[in-house]
Image: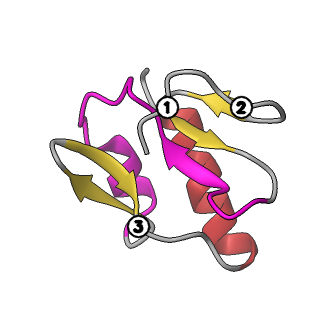
Amino acid sequence: MDRSAAPAGAQREGSVVARPGGEDGWYVDDRCTDCDVARQLAPGLIGEADGRSAVLRRPYGEAETGQMYAAAFACPR
């Protein structure tokens, strides 16, 4: 999803954005430069689509949630 402003309650780190709860709790915003950092840290959870990273599915469990947060914090944007 392409969103330039984080919704209320969102935690923004780089272009990977986390929002507690909701159907689309994780997404990549429009600042993504397709650098591949997030895909390397969360393979299977974050992939490439249309020249930028995209969340493929929500994380399940603590390990996958940790991968998503690692991707968010490592994002250079």
SS type, badge 1: loop
Please identify the residue farthest to the left as the structure is shown: 51
Which label number is shown at residue 3?
1
Which of the 4 quarters of the picture holds residue 68?
Answer: bottom right
Instruction: State how far apart marks 3 and 2 are (Cα).
Output: 20 Å
Residue at 23% across / 55% down in the picture?
48
Ranked by sequence position, the earlier of labels 3 and 1 is 1
Direction from residue 43 to residue 69 in the image, left or right: right
Residue kind at label 3, given as amino acid type: Leu
Instruction: State how far apart marks 3 and 1 are (Cα).
Output: 16 Å
Relative to the observer, which residue lies in front, 41 or 22? 22
Q: Which residue is mark 3?
A: 56
Q: Which residue is mark 2?
A: 7
Residue at 67% across / 60% down in the picture?
66
Residue 77 vertical placement versus 59 (above, below): above
Where does the magenta region start and end?
A: 22-43
